[in-house]
Image (tube, rainbow, N blue to C red):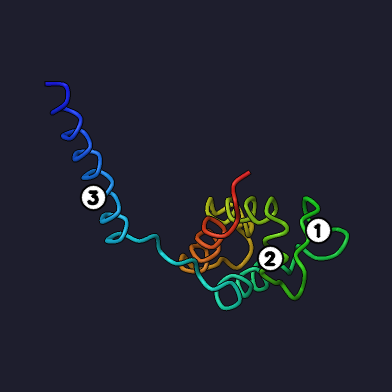
Amino acid sequence: MKSSLFPALGVLGLAAILSSTVFAQQNPRPAAPDFKKSVAPVIKKYCNGCHTGEYAPEGVVFPAAMTEAWAKSNAKVMRKSAAQMKAKKMPPAESTMPTAAERKAVVDWVAAKIPQS
């Protein structure tokens, strides 16, 4: 009886692996927004007005010419910025606000491209 149980377990295990693979292919993770087209312009438009120079709030300074390489090498700043944007804490209430799509682009890019620490 034991010997007939092992092939059945193997078949069930294989079925589970295959079904999860098929599910992943049917529901692929959405592609990250393009940094240059969708993320850098949002940072420039809504963040650079305050977050430049030596008196930038919280010491968070974004370069005028934001690059993907800079964003990836400053992961902590990008994660915090995305969280602040998602929670609608930044930009401050008295400032011009990004659209929902602009916020989502930054949040989605950070989630896809910046590793969690």
**Residue visible at 23% across and 37% down?**
10
- Residue type beneath disc 2: Cys
Percent position of residue 77, x then y: 70, 54
Percent position of residue 71, x then y: 68, 63
In front of the other: 35 or 43? 35
**Up/down of 51 relative to 67, above or below:** above
**Residue visible at 60% across and 56% down?**
114
**Residue visible at 64% across and 50% down?**
80
Q: Which mark is residue 47?
A: 2
Q: Which residue is mark 3?
A: 19
57 left or right of 9 in image = right
SS label for mark 3: helix
Q: Give the mark nearer the N terminus: 3 vs 1.
A: 3
Q: Quadrant of residue 110?
A: bottom right
Using the numbered discs, state the Cα–Cα distance from disc 2 to disc 3 in whole angstroms.
44 Å
Percent position of residue 32, x then y: 49, 66
Q: Give the mark nearer the N terminus: 1 vs 2.
A: 2
In front of the other: 32 or 53? 32
Q: Which residue is mark 1?
A: 56
Quadrant in which the C terminus is drawn: top right
- Residue type beneath disc 3: Ser
Q: Quadrant of residue 1?
A: top left
Using the numbered discs, state the Cα–Cα distance from disc 1 to disc 2 in whole angstroms.
10 Å
> Counting other residues with Cα less than 10 Å from the Cα at mark 3, is it few (<14), some (14-19), or many (20 or more)?
few
From the viewer's perspective, is the residue at label 3 or at label 1 nearer?
A: 3
In front of the other: 65 or 6? 6
